[in-house]
Image (cartoon, grey):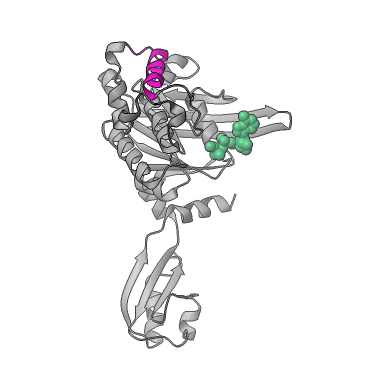
C-alpha cells in the first residue's frame, strides 16, 4: 500500500512498458512471445490484461515483476527502472502467479513470515494475521499448506504477494479453479485494496469479470497490443448491437421486409435482431416492422460485452 512511500514521490504511472520484446530460445527454435508491447498503467487503476492462451500475458507480467528476463525494451515500476534499480522496482510490485505452487509443509503463518523476511519487512511492521484475516484464512494460519483447498491456496498466494505492502499488485488468472463464493470474497478483498490506493493489474479469461472489475483494459494477441482503452470506450468501439422485439400478436412467419435483418425467433412473439448501428440505424429496423403491419409492445437492447469486442479485435490478425 502507498502509505509507506513518500507522498511527494507518487508517480502518475504505476507501470510503464516501452517496446517490450521477449524471445524464448529453446531446442525447438525461437518463440517471440512479446513483439514490441508498450503499455502505461495509471496509478490507482484496476487494469485488465486480456488475451487468449499463449498471447503473452504471463510473460509480460513476469517481466514486470522481474521473474523473467526481457529480450529488449524498458520497464519502469513506480518510477523505478527495472535495469537501473531492479531492487526498487521489484519492491514496488507483488505477484500472484498463475500456478498454485506452494511448499506443502509450510503453514500460512510461516509462509508469510518467510516472505516478509525475504523482503526485509521488520517484525514490528509485519501484519501476518491481518492479511490472513483479510483473505479469510485466519483459522488456517497453523495448517499445512497441503491440507488447503485450491481456493484457499489461491488466497494464500494473494496474501503472500501483499506481505511487503507493494503499491502494485499483479494477479495472473487468479480465479481459475476458485468457486463462485470464494471468487466473490477474493474480489471483495482486491477491490478493497484498490479502493485504498493499490494499483491492480489482472489477467483473466473471464471477460465479464474484467468488464465488471477493471476501469482500463488492454487486449493482447500473439505478443502484440490489440487494444488499450478505458472499459467504457472499449465497449463503445464495437459496432454491433442486438435488439429483442416483442410483438402484440403471435407471428406465423417472418415478413419479407424483416427477413433482410436476419431475425432470430426467440418464441412466437419475440424476435432477436443483430445489427451494426453505423450502417443500420435502429429506425430503419423499426420502419420495417411498421411496414409489415406489426405492432411492437416491447423493445430491449443488449449491452455489448467484451467477448464481442475481443473477437472483433483479434479475428482480423
Ligand atoms: P499467456 O499467459 O497469455 O497464456 P504466455 O506468456 O504463458 O501466454 O506464453 C506466450 C508464448 O510464449 C506461448 O507461445 C508460450 O508457449 C511461450 N512460452 C512461455 N514460456 C515459455 C518458455 N519458458 N520457453 C519457451 N516458450 C515459452
Ligand atoms: Mg498465462
In the displayed structure image, the side of residue 242 where residue 128 appears, left or right: left
Q: Does 278 lie within the magenta span?
A: no
In percent of width and height, residue 144 lies at 43, 25
In percent of width and height, residue 315 lies at 57, 53
Judge by depth and name the residue closer to the eye, 267 or 253: 267
In the displayed structure image, the side of residue 211 where residue 257 appears, left or right: right
Residue found 52% across the figure and 54% down from its top: 311
In percent of width and height, residue 110 lies at 39, 19
The quarter holding residue 116 reads top left
Residue found 37% across the figure and 28% down from its top: 159
Q: Is residue 268 above or below residue 15?
A: below
Judge by depth and name the residue closer to the eye, 261 or 25: 25
Q: Is residue 217 above or below residue 85?
A: below
Main SS of residues in magenta: helix
Q: Is residue 315 above or below residue 115?
A: below
Judge by depth and name the residue closer to the eye, 298 or 102: 102
Total residue callouts: 0
Task: Look at the image and tell me in which quarter the N terminus lies.
Answer: top left
Task: Report whether residue 262 is seen.
Answer: yes
Residue found 49% across the figure and 85% down from its top: 256
In percent of width and height, residue 222 lies at 59, 41
Q: Is residue 237 above or below residue 58?
A: below
Q: Does 119 lie within the magenta span?
A: yes
Residue found 55% across the figure and 24% down from its top: 68
Q: Which residues are magenta?
A: 108-122
In the displayed structure image, the side of residue 102 where residue 70 appears, left or right: right
Task: Report whether residue 33 is seen.
Answer: no
Amino acid at each position: 500500500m502507498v502509505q509507506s512511500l513518500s507522498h511527494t514521490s507518487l508517480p502518475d504511472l504505476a507501470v510503464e512498458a516501452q517496446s517490450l520484446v521477449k524471445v524464448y530460445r529453446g531446442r525447438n527454435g525461437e518463440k517471440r512471445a512479446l513483439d514490441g508491447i508498450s503499455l502505461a498503467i495509471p496509478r490507482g487503476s484496476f487494469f485488465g490484461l486480456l488475451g487468449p492462451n499463449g498471447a503473452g500475458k504471463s510473460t509480460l507480467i513476469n517481466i514486470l515483476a522481474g521473474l523473467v528476463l526481457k529480450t529488449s525494451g524498458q520497464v519502469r515500476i513506480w518510477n523505478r527502472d527495472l535495469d537501473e534499480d531492479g531492487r526498487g522496482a521489484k519492491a514496488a510490485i507483488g505477484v500472484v502467479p498463475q500456478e498454485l505452487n506452494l511448499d506443502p509443509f509450510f503453514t500460512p503463518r510461516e509462509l508469510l513470515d518467510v516472505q516478509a523476511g525475504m523482503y526485509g519487512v521488520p517484525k514490528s511492521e509485519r501484519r501476518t494475521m491481518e492479511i490472513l484475516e483479510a483473505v479469510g484464512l485466519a483459522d488456517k494460519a497453523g495448517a499445512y499448506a497441503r491440507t488447503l483447498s485450491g481456493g484457499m491456496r489461491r488466497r494464500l498466494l494473494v496474501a503472500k504477494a501483499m506481505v511487503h505492502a507493494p503499491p502494485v499488485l499483479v494477479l495472473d488468472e487468479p480465479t481459475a479453479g476458485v468457486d463462485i463464493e470464494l471468487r466473490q470474497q477474493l474480489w471483495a478483498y482486491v477491490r478493497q485494496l484498490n479502493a485504498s490506493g493499490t494499483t491492480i493489474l489482472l489477467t483473466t479469461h473471464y471477460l465479464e469479470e474484467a468488464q465488471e472489475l477493471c476501469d482500463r483494459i488492454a487486449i493482447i494477441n500473439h505478443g502484440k497490443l490489440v487494444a488499450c482503452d478505458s472499459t467504457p470506450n472499449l465497449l463503445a468501439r464495437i459496432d454491433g448491437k442486438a435488439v429483442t422485439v416483442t410483438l402484440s400478436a403471435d407471428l406465423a412467419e417472418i415478413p419479407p421486409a424483416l427477413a433482410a435483418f436476419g431475425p432470430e425467433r426467440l418464441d412466437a412473439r419475440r424476435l432477436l435482431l443483430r445489427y451494426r448501428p453505423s450502417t443500420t440505424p435502429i429506425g430503419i429496423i423499426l420502419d420495417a416492422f411498421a411496414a409489415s403491419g406489426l405492432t411492437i409492445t416491447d423493445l430491449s437492447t443488449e449491452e455489448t460485452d467484451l467477448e464481442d469486442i475481443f473477437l472483433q479485435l483479434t479475428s482480423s490478425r
